[in-house]
Image (tube, rainbow, N blue to C red):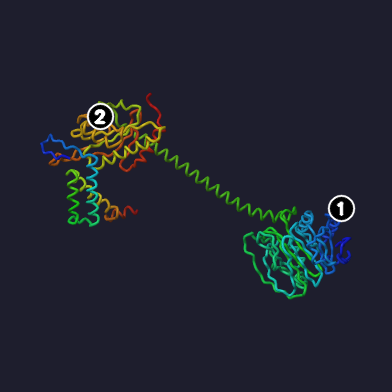
Amino acid sequence: MSSGSLGELSKMTAPTATERKVCWGARDKYWQCLDETNEDFSLCQKFRTLFEGSCPPQWIKYFDKRRDYLKYKAKMQSGGYQSQESTSKL
Amino acid sequence: MIAEKGSQGTGNGDNWIRNVDWLEGGSVDWLQELSEERGNAGDRGLQLVRSPSGFISVGQQETDSALGHRADQNISPVGRPDVKMYQRLASCILQDQHLGSIQFLKQMAFQMKALSNGGDVVLRNVRSKTNWISSGTEWHLQARSAITKCNYKALKHLGTNLFSCSCSKRVLPSKRSTILPAQIIGNLVNSSLKSVPLLTIHKATSQCMREQLQLPGVGKFLRTHSLFNSCHLAQRVMSATPGNLILLTHRPFSKSSADKSLRGSAGRQQMTLRSKFLVTFLFGAVALGSWFYVHLEKKQQKKLRRQEQLKKLALGQGDFNLLDHTGRPRTKSDFFGQWVLLYFGFTHCPDICPDEMEKMSNAVHILDKDRTLPSVQPIFITVDPERDGVDEMGKYIKDFHTRMIGLTGTTEQISELGKAYRVYYSAGPKDEDNDYIVDHTIIIYLLNPDGLFIDYYNRSKSDQEIAESIRGHMKTYVQLFS
């Protein structure tokens, strides 16, 4: 992928299928590390670097947001939010 | 009783009648008949013989070499009994008549031989070896079988409620059988037999009860055998006195009413159980079937309602004029006559668009396998026309289904199209590389060959589900425009 800084006319070409897969693989590894270390960023720096190197910056931002969302959803579903759980029991 | 001519017994008619005159009438006539029959049938006639020891046997006159080894001039030859006699005997019993001292023989299964030496009796089954009983031995009741109403009266009269029957399916004589000495029988006659149950039916699988019966030896014992298989249908009662040997049987094929009632009830009981099962099963099947039918109906109704709603929505009105990934202009009418799957996305999409495109391709692949179905046209339309031109579209879609078409156009064209399909899309903030993510609705649209929108599939639908849904629509599709 090209990171052009040629002004507003620059068009970044979208990642190809292979590039996408590489990016997803790095992301998965990074997320796996976070899962294992319980969100300990310091232990997963290596993966983070790899991740950032494999994916466009927009994607990294997007994936980070996605991870937050997924974590939040998991917490909700497991009853992290008490009142929701009680209403669902009704 | 009738003493038969040609018999080896020395008893005369008077003696015999005396022995049995405590029995009810009717049996004597019967015996008379039997003996007459013998006369008529010749060889196959019946013979009533009484030996000095007091045993009476009935049977065909037939030489039986096997009997020879215990030959005794008092032995009465016995052979295969007449079936008719057997039946008659059964009917006689069941009509609440009582038999006199008749030795009953089961057809082809049993032989009884009365010996007069020392009171020993040999009961022999033609199929098995001879079993001897000696006096003074304790005997166990092998089993107890049911007593029919018919038998009960007979038993009462005869004074015994003990009998032996085997609960197995095999006709085997049991080595241990009940034996009643004369005195006990005599006592029983006089006492009431409260313990004799009425119409007790044992099922064939029930456990035989074992009872140890200790009788004071009197030096004369008789052996009893059961001649039938199942406990509940056949009971045999034997009671023996030094003067009489009586065997009562109850056969299921008898024509008497008592037998019918018993057999009927036993049969009815069996039938009732079976018919109960059948009825329950039928009920269950009907209930299940009707529930299922209602369930299907409900599903169908739901489906129709959904379709109606979507039709009302009438998405995708109006035409479009876009460029495909080869640069060729395409309008809506180009796709008339084909089933179309539409997906709105953009090539810079991180993960969702590739996933959905993959799903769409798989669904089309699944439908491709079925040659009877028309082919489905997958289309990818960009919501990011600034970046996704013809070339970009071409590069992007080649990773997916071969028939996939990518459509792009000017910003205005895409905007109009988006409005028509109510596709929400909104480009996010640009970063320093001018990269941005376009937020958009994640939906795959299905258009029928008339170009009308009829269904949609969101992220939660799998490729299989989408394929199935399209298949369903194809089946129910009725051509609107020719």
Amino acid type for the residue under numbered disc 1: Asn
Comparing A9 with B268, the one in front is A9
Residue that mark 2 sits on? B324
Quarter of the view holding residue B237? bottom right
Question: Where does the N terminus of chain A fall, quadrant-wise?
Answer: top left
| Residue at image location 48% in from the left, 41% down from the top | B293
Question: Could you tell me which secondary element the residue under label 1 belongs to?
Answer: helix
**Disc 2 is attached to a residue of which chain?**
B
Q: Position of residue B330 (x, y in %)?
A: 27, 26
Question: Could you tell me which secondary element the residue under label 2 belongs to?
Answer: strand
Q: Position of residue B225 (x, y in %)?
A: 72, 64
| Residue at image location 17% in from the left, 56% down from the top | A42
**Residue B178 seen from this side:** yes
**Residue B191 seen from this side:** no
Q: Is residue B169 left or right of residue B4?
A: left
> Mark 1 near mark 2, Cβ–Cβ under 8 Å?
no
In the image, residue B390 sits, relative to residue B185, either above or below, namely above
Comparing B410 with B226, the one in front is B226
Quarter of the view holding residue B422? top left
Outermost residue on the top side: it is B482
Q: Is residue B5 left or right of residue B402?
A: right
| Residue at image location 60% in from the left, 53% down from the top | B273
Query: If you read the primary sequence from the N terminus, does the residue marked by circle 1 or circle 2 appear first?
Result: 1
Residue that mark 1 sits on? B40
**Disc 1 is attached to a residue of which chain?**
B
Query: Alpha-carbon distance for marks 1 and 2?
Result: 111 Å
- Label drawn at residue B212: none
Q: Is residue B9 left or right of residue B465?
A: right
